[in-house]
Image (cartoon, grey):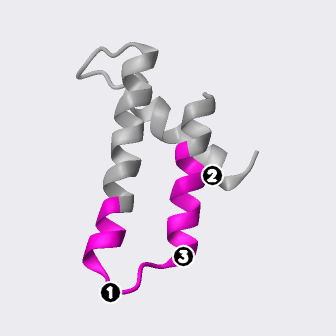
Amino acid sequence: MTQAEKTAKELYIRFYTNKDMVLSPFEAKQCALICVDEILNNERNTTMHPNDKIMYHWQEVKQAIYKL
């Protein structure tokens, strides 16, 4: 399992097993994707030169979430 796959799984599980709200697997996946999009947007918008390694990692995480 790659680091991106591990991060994707952990993020998904964090939403799916949240005791404060009941989410379906689809909803948990959508929440995880929204989080990754927010991270990517933040990296693009807050720095003059986004870190390519960070951007690549989170793009890989996003792809791994789609595969869950």
Total residue callouts: 3
Pinpoint residue 36: horizontal percent, then vertical percent. Answer: 41, 49
Locate residue 9: give its quadrant: top right
Q: Amino acid at mark 3?
A: Asp
Residue 48, which numbered label?
1
Q: Which of pointers 1 and 2 lies earlier in the amino acid sequence? A: 2
Marks 1 and 2: CB-CB under 8 Å?
no
C-alpha distance separating marks 2 and 3: 15 Å
Which residue lies at the image location 34% right of the left edge and 26% below the top edge? 18
From the viewer's side, name the closer residue of 56 and 4. Answer: 56
Q: Residues within 10 Å of mark 3 (few under 14, many from 20)?
A: few
- Which residue is the site of mark 3? 52
Marks 2 and 3: CB-CB under 8 Å?
no
C-alpha distance separating marks 1 and 3: 12 Å
- Which residue is the site of mark 2? 4
Residue 47 seen in this snapshot: yes
Which residues, given as a range, are shown in magenta? 41-62
Pinpoint residue 3: horizontal percent, then vertical percent. Answer: 67, 54
